[in-house]
Structures are given as structure tokens and as C-alpha cells.
């Protein structure tokens, strides 16, 4: 609702009070030509969503209405997700969200899944490329067969070649016995090769031959083997640009570029953030034996406004940490690590240059402390709170890690 503040028969304040009393979910934008600080404060305290002083441009009014529409959508979505708590069920494609961009991805998955076509999945780190690959497999005629996921970025060239194609005894130093490769083990199933951009041109050549014939030679063997395997590739890099630079084979690129699926980052599908967050909340409630009902208003606003550079993986980690820390019925900004990235407005404005320098130093120190705290907490959570194991994992000496851990604990204790 948009209402003026000064009107003949009934003032805007009375309209606002009655609307908020009878229709509390309605968002009200108040406009007035008699703007003042006191009137703005009174209007906002009474429950107005926004306050627009005259004169304003059409674009300013459109902007206020657009903000109200987004706010309304977020509140409605949150209420619906709370009502569904305990009844959330994943669909057959295992993808959470209903944004137009995600629906486009789901539509592409549904079209290609029944076929045996090679698929290339593009997406930033953490967007869920393996989840898409598993959705394709789960909706294909191979769904009852094996699914192998291989991260090509974590294996050396020799090890990757051996893992994929297998080897015979004596093929190389350390090959003490015959080993079947993933392609043979995945006969009639699906193989997902993630981060294909990290594969050497030599391996690309062998894969190209395999794609065309579905035949391969295990290392050290002379007899070709034939298998029926569906291949799905994924990358977070621009393969076309790599081809232009000569670091990726052009013939291999065109052979795997049959059916590309591009997964949009989370920042481009804001409508999916809350459904995904509630899905993770339900998972971690069960796993950690808690009964958190949802998120408070400030936490919801922050999550939906945040860009999530780490995408769904970052959101998952944030919810897991929040559930661990939360001791109330709702998760607030206090439990969300991303809330630390938003500096609160300073209560004091420096009056002198010396005060300005002091405040800058304090802000820098708080920023460093924030990063250190999140670094330590994440390492501990990833290693079941084992200090020795966490220190080894991140590459710190145990004594240095423990000092940082104790400092973090002191900071956390002050907050509570």
C-alpha cells in the first residue's frame, strides 16, 4: 500500500495504524511533503516499510515498490518454509529451489537424463556440479547401476590414468597386482569426471579415444576392453579460452561439448537461498539433535542479501556452524559467520585526526580477528574439534594453533 501522510478525511498515520492492525503482513510506503526527522521516526515506529519525502522521481518510487515486493516475497517464502518444517522432501532430481534459473537447469536435466549423451556441466566452485551429475544418473535408465565420481584436480597424471583405465601386474614400479580401472568397474553405469580442465593433454587424448569407441587399454596390457559407460564432465573454468591458449585440446573440447548445462551461482538465484537454508537446517537439526524452528528476520535479510561467493557449499557450512552455536529457537546474526562481514554503523564519529587514526586501527584489528576466528573455528569443525588434527590439516604448529584457538574462545566467551 502507498499512502500520503497528509490527507483530508483520514491522515496517513491513522491509515497506517489500521492497516497494520487488521492486515499486519501488508507493507506500507508513506509519502509526504512535510518530511522531518520526527515524522519519519514516528512513521517507521508505527510499522511503515519505507518513507518517501516529496518531491521524488518515478524511479525513486519504483525503487521503493521494488524493495517492498522483494521483502514481501522473502517473508511469504519464510512463512511457507516454516509451515513445511518436518515435511520437507527432496524431489527426484535432488535439487532445492524454485527460481526460474534453477527450473531451467532442472528442465535440461530432465531432457538429457533418459539419453546416453555426454554432458558437460559448467559452474563456479560450490554450485553443486556433482549434484547435477547425480540427478542425471538418478533419472536415467542406468539409475540402478554404479555411479563413480572422480575429482581430476586431486590426482596426478599417472595416478589418474591408472585409476580410470586400470593396469596389469608389472606395468610400472609398484604395480604388484592387476587392478581394474573405474571405467571397467562402471560398466553399464555412469562416470562423472569433475574438474576436467585440470587433465593433461595426454590424458585428454586417451579420453577422446575412449569417448569415440568406448574401448581402452589398461596400462601395460595389449588387449583392448570394451565397456558401456555414460560420461559426464564438469569444470569451473572457461574451456573455450583454454583451447585458445593451447592448454586444452580443441578436438577433445568439441567432443565433450555435446550438451552443456550451466549452473548459475547462488547470487543469481536469490529465491533459492531460503529453501536451501531450511533444507540444511532440517538436516543438521536431525544430525546434531536440535529443534531450531528457523531464522529471525535479521538473519533472513542478511542471507538473502549476501552474495555467497562460495555458493551452496558456503551456505551449507554457515548453517551447520549456526546450528552448532544456536541455543535458542531461531538462528540470529550472532550465529551466522557471514554477519561478521557487515560492520555495524559506528556509534561515535571521530572528532579529530588522532581519533580517526585510532578508530581505523581498531577496525583493522577487528577485521583480522574476525578472519582468524573463522579460520580456527572452521578448522576445528572440519576435524571434529581435535586440535592436533586441525593444526596438522591447516599447516600450523600445534602450539601456534592452540594459542589462536584460546584467543578465539575468549572472543566467543565475550559475545555470550
Image (cartoon, grey):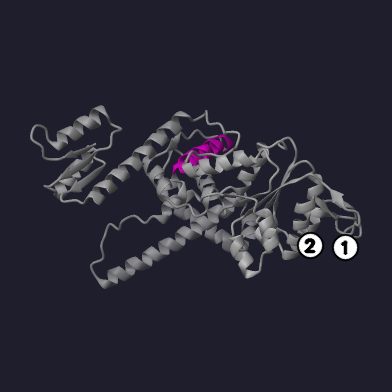
Task: Please tell me whether residue 125 is drawn above or below residue 45 in the rendered image.
Answer: below
Q: Is residue 127 magenta?
A: no
In this picture, which residue range is highlighted in magenta? 271-287
Q: Position of residue 383 (x, y in %)?
A: 62, 51
Query: Mark 1 or mark 2, which has the lower sequence index?
Result: 2
**Which label belongs to residue 380?**
none
Q: Are marks 1 and 2 in contact (CB under 8 Å)?
A: yes
Query: Toward the viewer: 230 or 36?
Result: 230
Query: Toward the viewer: 138 or 285?
Result: 138
Q: Position of residue 359 (x, y in %)?
A: 33, 66
Q: Which residue is mark 1?
A: 172
Q: Examine the residues drawn in magenta and state their main secondary structure.
A: helix
Circle 1: element type: loop
73 on left or right of 38: right
Can you say which quadrant of the picture contains the N terminus?
top left
Q: Residue at x 26, y 51 (%)?
A: 59
Query: Toward the viewer: 335 or 190?
Result: 190
Q: Position of residue 40 (x, y in %)?
A: 18, 46
Q: Residue at x 16, y 51 (%)?
A: 55
- Give the Cα separation between the discs numbered 1 and 2: 10 Å
Amino acid at each position: 500500500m502507498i499512502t500520503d501522510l497528509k490527507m483530508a478525511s483520514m491522515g496517513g498515520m491513522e491509515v497506517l495504524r489500521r492497516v497494520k492492525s487488521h492486515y499486519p503482513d501488508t507493507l506500507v510506503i508513506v509519502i509526504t511533503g512535510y518530511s522531518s526527522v520526527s515524522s519519519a521516526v514516528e512513521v517507521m515506529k508505527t510499522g511503515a516499510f519505507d518513507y518517501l519525502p516529496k518531491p521524488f522521481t518515478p524511479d525513486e518510487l519504483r525503487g521503493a515498490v521494488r524493495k517492498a515486493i522483494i521483502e514481501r516475497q522473502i517473508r511469504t517464502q519464510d512463512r511457507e518454509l516454516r509451515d513445511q518444517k518436518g515435511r520437507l522432501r527432496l524431489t527426484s532430481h535432488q535439487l532445492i529451489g524454485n527460481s526460474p534459473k534453477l527450473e531451467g537447469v532442472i528442465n535440461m536435466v530432465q531432457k538429457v537424463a533418459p539419453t546416453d549423451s555426454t554432458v558437460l556441466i559448467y559452474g563456479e566452485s560450490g554450485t553443486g556440479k556433482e549434484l547435477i551429475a547425480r540427478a542425471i544418473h538418478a533419472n536415467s535408465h542406468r539409475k540402478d547401476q554404479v555411479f563413480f565420481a572422480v575429482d581430476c584436480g586431486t590426482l596426478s597424471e599417472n595416478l589418474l590414468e591408472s585409476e580410470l583405465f586400470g593396469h596389469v601386474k608389472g606395468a610400472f614400479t609398484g604395480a604388484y597386482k592387476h587392478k581394474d580401472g573405474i571405467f571397467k568397474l562402471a560398466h553399464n553405469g555412469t562416470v562423472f569426471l569433475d574438474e576436467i580442465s585440470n587433465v593433461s593433454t595426454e590424458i585428454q587424448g586417451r579420453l577422446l579415444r575412449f569417448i569415440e569407441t568406448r574401448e581402452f587399454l589398461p596400462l601395460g596390457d595389449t588387449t583392448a576392453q570394451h565397456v558401456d559407460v555414460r560420461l559426464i564432465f564438469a569444470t569451473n573454468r572457461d574451456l573455450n579460452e583454454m583451447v585458445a591458449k593451447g592448454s586444452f585440446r580443441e578436438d577433445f573440447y568439441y567432443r565433450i561439448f555435446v550438451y552443456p548445462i550451466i549452473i548459475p551461482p547462488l547470487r543469481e538465484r536469490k529465491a533459492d537461498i531460503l529453501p536451501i537454508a531450511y533444507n540444511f537446517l532440517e538436516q543438521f537439526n536431525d544430525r546434531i539433535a536440535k529443534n531450531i524452528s528457523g531464522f529471525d528476520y535479521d538473519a533472513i535479510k542478511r542471507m538473502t542479501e549476501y552474495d555467497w561467493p562460495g555458493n551452496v557449499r558456503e551456505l551449507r557450512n554457515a548453517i551447520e556452524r549456526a546450528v552448532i552455536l544456536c541455543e535458542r529457537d531461531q538462528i540470529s546474526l550472532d550465529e551466522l559467520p557471514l554477519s561478521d562481514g557487515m560492520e555495524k554503523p559506528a556509534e561515535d564519529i571521530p572528532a579529530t585526526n588522532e581519533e580517526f587514526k585510532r578508530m581505523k586501527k581498531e577496525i583493522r584489528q577487528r577485521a583480522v580477528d574476525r578472519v582468524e576466528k573463522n579460520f580456527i573455528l572452521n578448522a576445528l569443525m572440519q576435524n571434529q574439534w581435535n586440535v592436533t588434527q586441525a593444526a596438522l590439516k591447516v599447516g600450523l604448529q600445534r602450539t601456534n594453533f592452540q594459542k589462536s584457538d584460546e584467543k578465539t574462545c575468549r572472543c566467543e566467551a565475550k559475545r555470550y
